[in-house]
Image (cartoon, rainbow, N blue to C red):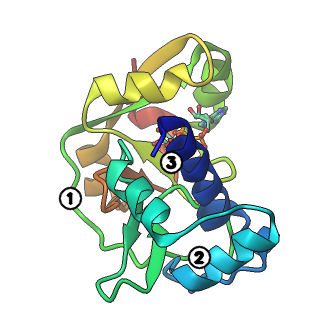
Amino acid sequence: MSKKRLDETSKFLSFVLRHEPQAIGLTLDSEGWANIDALISGAAGDGRNLDRTLIESVVASSDKKRFSISEDGQSIRAVQGHSTKSVALQLEEKQPPETLYHGTATRFIDSINQQGLIPGSRHHVHLSEESATASAVGQRYGTVVILKVAAQQMQEQGFKFYQAENGVWLTEHVPVDFISS
Ligand code: HQG
């Protein structure tokens, strides 16, 4: 299986499983699960030739473990990054490390200094345990800036933190007072 084919399919799966399932007539349950056979037939209607082997290879080779397959092998979901309103992952609250990192781009800094970190179109602000990961995330948008988030202090003050299956930390909003560079 070529890397190109895996990458293209991964992007397509992110699109339908996080953002626009309706684009291929797919329904996700509130935990984000889609039936794999329905995904394959919906994709076929969109001119995309997916099969189970390809889907399983994408799940297994995803560098960030973006997707998971249910225990019974019937369903697939994205583990984080959703924007679609139909999904509300039942994430368990978890105690974060003292500091988490957020990688962003210089051009967003003025706005972040005013509003704190906001989720944008996604359901959560995404935070990393490693500054190197945050750096890779921020580079997607331009010259990177790594911000430190006083996560434990936030939690002590009542803010909730969650961790997705792939290790990404999630919270709803990071006010300016808890951000430093
Ligand atoms: C920025 C990828 C202006 C924020 C990555 C970010 C991650 C603000 C952008 C995952 C702001 C949103 C998520 C404010 C935040 N004013 N800009 N007040 N607050 N921002 O893509 O965290 O490959 O939705 O800094 O690796 O970059 O898709 O979030 O630059 O894990 O699996 O607004 O997406 O994973 O961008 O990335 P995004 P993100 P995948």
Ligand 1 image position (quadrant): top right
Q: Earlier in the sequence, mark 1 or mark 2?
A: 2
Instruction: Write down the residue under mark 1.
Output: 95
Counting from the top left corner in percent of width and height, residue 98 is at 19, 40
Counting from the top left corner in percent of width and height, residue 118 is at 60, 45
Task: Kindly identify the amino acid type of the residue bearing the numbered disc 2.
Answer: Val
Counting from the top left corner in percent of width and height, residue 138 is at 51, 24
Q: Residue at x 34, y 29 (%)?
A: 133
Q: Is residue 53 left or right of residue 157?
A: right
Whether residue 35 can be seen here = no
Q: Residue at x 74, y 71 (%)?
A: 44
87, above or below 166, in the image: below
Instruction: Write down the residue under mark 2.
Output: 87
Whether residue 138 can be seen here = yes
41, above or below 128, in the image: below
Counting from the top left corner in percent of width and height, residue 107 is at 67, 16
Task: Kindly identify the amino acid type of the residue bearing the numbered disc 1.
Answer: Gln
Q: Earlier in the sequence, mark 2 or mark 3?
A: 2
- Between 174 and 30, the residue placed more toward the observer is 30
- Between 150 and 168, the residue placed more toward the observer is 168
Q: CA distance from mark 2 to mark 3?
A: 16 Å
